[in-house]
Every structure is written in structure tokens, then in C-alpha cells.
């Protein structure tokens, strides 16, 4: 993927991440948890591509480390929130439940 290729070819990593997020948003209309998992996993895939690929087009915004951390933290946060969503969460973190009860006051 050198500079000699056409612009759309150089931008496929960004298009893949944006396409995954779009699919996730569309799936969210019917199934919230599945759609948000797709969105989070798309961002995590962006972090992996930013780490492993020498050229990722416009997916590269800052330094590789900053992009990796940003995409990774956002993706992991969305995945974790999707797995903790009510009703019937897949993951329960007792510390977070205590914090919520403290803040809400119940």
C-alpha cells in the first residue's frame, strides 16, 4: 500500500472501521447488545490495524501509540458497556454496582 495507489485503495482500513460501525448502528435498531458489540469490535479492529499495518491511510490521526490507545480504550469501553447492559447483563462487576448505588442513593 504505497503512495502510488489510488486514494480509495489507501483508505480501506478507515472504510472497514466506518463500515463496521455503520453495520453496528443498523443492527442496534433491532438488537441493542449485538449492535453495540459490533461497534466496539470495529474500533478494536482499528486499533489492531493501526498497530500492525505500516500504512492505514486516514485511520492514522496522531502517533501510532496515541491512535492505538484511543481506538482501543473506546472499543473496549463500548464492548464492556454492551456486555453490562440491562436486562440480563453478561458481565457483572460488583464494584460498579456499589458505585451506582452510592451515587443514586438507593
Image (cartoon, rainbow, N blue to C red):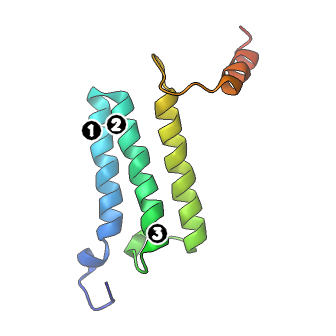
Residue 95 sits in which quadrant? top right
Q: Residues within 10 Å of mark 3 (few under 14, many from 20)?
A: many
Tag shown at residue 26:
1
Q: Residue at x 54, y 65 (%)?
A: 67
Q: Quadrant of residue 31?
A: top left
Cβ–Cβ below 8 Å for labels 3 and 2? no
Of badges 1 and 3, nearer the viewer stands 3
Q: What distance separates the C-alpha of mark 1 from that of mark 2?
A: 7 Å
Measure how far apart labels 1 and 3 are at the Cα level.
25 Å
Residue bearing the label numbered 2 = 35
Q: Mark 3 sits on what residue?
A: 50
Q: Residue 16's x, y, as percent? A: 30, 60
Could you say which is closer to the camera, residue 83 or residue 11? Answer: 83
Mark 3 and mark 2 lie on one chain; the one further toward the N terminus is: 2
Quarter placement of the N terminus: bottom left
Where residue 29 sits: x, y (%)? Answer: 29, 30
Amino acid at each position: 500500500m504505497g503512495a502510488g495507489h489510488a486514494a480509495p485503495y489507501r483508505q480501506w482500513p478507515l472504510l472497514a472501521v466506518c463500515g463496521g460501525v455503520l453495520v453496528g448502528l443498523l443492527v442496534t435498531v433491532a438488537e441493542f447488545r449485538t449492535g453495540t458489540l459490533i461497534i466496539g469490535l470495529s474500533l478494536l479492529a482499528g486499533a489492531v490495524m493501526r498497530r500492525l499495518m505500516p500504512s492505514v491511510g486516514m485511520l492514522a490521526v496522531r502517533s501510532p501509540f496515541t491512535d492505538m490507545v484511543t481506538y482501543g480504550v473506546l472499543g473496549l469501553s463500548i464492548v464492556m458497556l454492551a456486555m453490562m447492559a440491562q436486562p440480563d447483563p453478561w458481565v457483572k462487576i460488583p464494584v460498579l454496582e456499589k458505585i451506582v448505588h452510592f451515587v443514586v442513593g438507593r
